[in-house]
């Protein structure tokens, strides 16, 4: 009896059929999506990542496909992910991290993101870290520019990381926009991968709003592809590593016109390796992170909801 039960449980958790049984309409909806346009040789692709790990979660498959097609891939991270106090505590092996722990976490996460990019094949010279505060990008976006915003986690009011693009730059919108403009001047992207403003995370929404403004000024909004990582309650379902399950349409983005990007098994394995480079994150939420390694990624060419 126990054997039968565990067989049934194994089927329920791992069979590709299982997801169809539990989510018949959702799996059918993904199957019916059109494929995203392929990347073209010689084009320049910029992925804008609010935190270390977003680059791999949203887009590891797409970045590999862009590189395989002969595109140039660049990544910019707005924050160093220095806001995760649980993480900082784990890193320091103590429930009460000492002063500076979140900042040290930021340095560690810059290293993890660099290793993830290397796993995906993105050259180190194409990576830029801006070092703005995790958890405070929307505040920076909305604040007036006269006083720098204070990081709720590190206490910093200026970029504290020597490896950032502008060490010592104040935490203001003008300063962040100047840094992003420098990246745009350097990369001159044909395709920009941005979070959608439907993403639940405030840093992701702020990243999208700031970048959409800058790209609109340059007439580059037409080349944007939008992704989502914080797609709403329980998404992606189910948690954990299920290589033969599709990535379902997220609750928060159900009104967007999603396109599918199908990953090969090799691309899935490389995506998993990139995600596993984020060891501080794998320590605290492995099943959430692994749930992004699915048969497909989702992307949309418009941030506007369908009416
Ligand atoms: Zn993020």
Image (cartoon, rainbow, N blue to C red):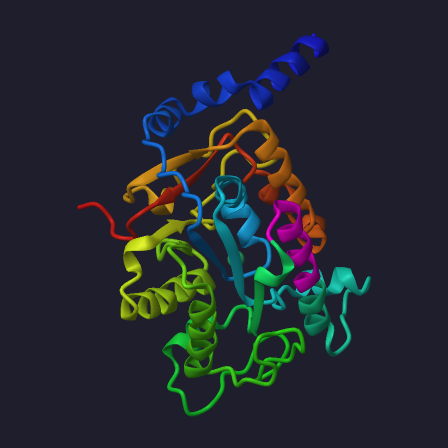
Which percent across, then down, holds residue 140?
44, 77
Disc tally is 0
The residue at the point 59 percent across, 23 percent down is 13
The residue at the point 41 percent across, 43 percent down is 40
Image vertical order of residue 132 relative to residue 263, above or below: below
The residue at the point 34 percent across, 70 percent down is 214
Identify which residue, 202 or 109, lies in the foreground.
109
Q: Residue furthest right?
A: 93
Identify which residue, 137 or 128, lies in the foreground.
128
Q: Quadrant of the N terminus?
A: top right
Image vertical order of residue 197 relative to residue 30, above or below: below
Q: Residue furthest left?
A: 307
Please state the extent of the stretch shown in magenta in the rendering.
109-122
Which percent across, then down, holds residue 87?
69, 60
Q: Main secondary structure of the magenta part?
A: helix
Residue 178 appears in which quarter of the rendering? bottom left
Q: Residue furthest front?
A: 42
- Can residue 291 be spotted in the picture? yes
Residue 255 horizontal side relative to residue 251, left or right: left
Which percent across, then down, holds residue 61?
52, 40
Residue 34 horizontal side relative to residue 229, left or right: left
- Can residue 241 be spotted in the picture? no
Which percent across, then down, holds residue 258?
33, 40
227 in magenta: no
110 in magenta: yes
Image vertical order of residue 290 relative to residue 183, above or below: above
Residue 257 horizontal side relative to residue 31, left or right: left
The residue at the point 28 percent across, 55 percent down is 222
């Amino acid at each position: 009896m126990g054997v039968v039960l565990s067989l049934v449980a194994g089927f329920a958790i791992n069979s590709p059929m299982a997801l169809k049984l539990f989510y018949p309409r959702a799996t059918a909806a993904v199957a019916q999506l059109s494929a995203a346009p392929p990347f073209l040789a010689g084009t320049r692709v910029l992925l804008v990542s609010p935190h270390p790990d977003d680059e791999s979660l949203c887009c590891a498959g797409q970045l590999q496909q862009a590189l395989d097609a002969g595109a140039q891939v660049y990544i910019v991270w707005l924050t160093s992910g220095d806001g995760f106090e649980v993480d900082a505590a784990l890193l320091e092996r103590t429930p009460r991290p000492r002063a500076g722990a979140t900042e040290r976490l930021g340095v560690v996460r810059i290293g993890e993101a660099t290793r993830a990019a290397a796993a995906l094949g993105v050259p180190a010279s194409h990576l830029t870290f801006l070092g703005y505060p995790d958890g405070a990008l929307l505040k920076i976006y909305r604040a007036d520019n006269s006083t720098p915003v204070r990081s709720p986690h590190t206490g910093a009011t200026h970029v504290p990381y020597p490896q950032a693009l502008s060490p010592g730059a104040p935490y203001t919108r003008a300063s962040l926009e100047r840094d992003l403009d420098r990246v745009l001047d350097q990369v001159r992207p044909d395709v920009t991968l941005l979070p959608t403003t439907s993403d639940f995370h405030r840093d992701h929404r702020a990243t999208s709003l700031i970048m959409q403004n800058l790209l609109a000024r340059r007439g580059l909004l037409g080349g944007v592809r939008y992704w989502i990582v914080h797609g709403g309650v329980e998404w992606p379902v189910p948690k954990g590593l299920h290589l033969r399950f599709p990535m379902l349409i997220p609750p928060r983005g159900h009104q967007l016109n999603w396109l599918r990007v199908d990953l090969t098994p090799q691309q899935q394995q490389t995506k998993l390796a990139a995600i596993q480079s984020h060891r501080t994150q794998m320590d605290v939420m492995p099943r959430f992170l692994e749930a992004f390694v699915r048969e497909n990624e989702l992307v949309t060419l418009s941030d506007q909801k369908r009416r």
